[in-house]
Image (cartoon, rainbow, N blue to C red):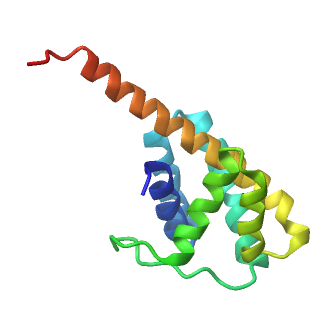
Amino acid sequence: MPEAERVLVRALRHWSDGPDGQERIARLLLASMGEAEAQTCQRALNDVMGVIARHGRRKLVRHKETCSCVGADEAVFAHFVMLAATGEREDAMLIGSLIVEGPLLMAMTEAARQAGLYLHRATISKLNATVRQRAGATLH
């Protein structure tokens, strides 16, 4: 599973634990991006997950925080957010329609796009740093 989607699965697991879990999300995001970006990303994630919690067709099933496997609902959620982030809006909305009713779909997809963009950008930055570090290494 790509790094950004792994972070989204962890965030979904943490968010459901209330304020303590949301604080863990803040630390997780801060480790991946700057403070302003982490706060904006967390607000967008809160919007997405809040809509799902209040208006979801059903409660999303999640695994324990320490579980190394990924459940179907977790995978669908992460995939939905990354589709929205990477410009696959129609596909994201199709998947999002499985999660919430139509009237909430646009707002949830837009919040998912914003959160996913920050996570996607952080993943690319991390990858670029790794490539730069390797570029300076001596090759044998």
Q: Residue at x 33, y 20 (%)?
A: 132
Which of the image's four quarters has the N terminus? bottom left
The residue positioned farthest toward the bottom in the image shown: 58
Residue 99 versus residue 64: which sits nearer the camera?
99
Residue 56 quadrant = bottom right
Q: Residue at x 53, y 33 (%)?
A: 34
Left or right of 37? Residue 65 is: left
Q: At which x and y percent is residue 31?
A: 43, 41
Q: At which x and y percent is residue 121?
A: 55, 36
Q: Residue at x 61, y 36 (%)?
A: 37
> Is residue 17 among the parts visible in the rendering?
no
Left or right of 90? Residue 12 is: left
The residue positioned farthest toward the left in the image shown: 140
Q: Looking at the image, is 90 positioned above or below residue 115?
A: below
Q: Looking at the image, is 117 positioned above or below residue 54?
A: above
The residue positioned farthest toward the right in the image shown: 103
Q: Looking at the image, is 78 positioned above or below residue 132?
A: below
Q: At which x and y percent is residue 69?
A: 36, 73
Q: How many marks?
A: 0
Q: At which x and y percent is residue 5?
A: 50, 56
Residue 73 quadrant = bottom right
Left or right of 107? Residue 134 is: left
> Is residue 89 among the parts visible in the rendering?
yes
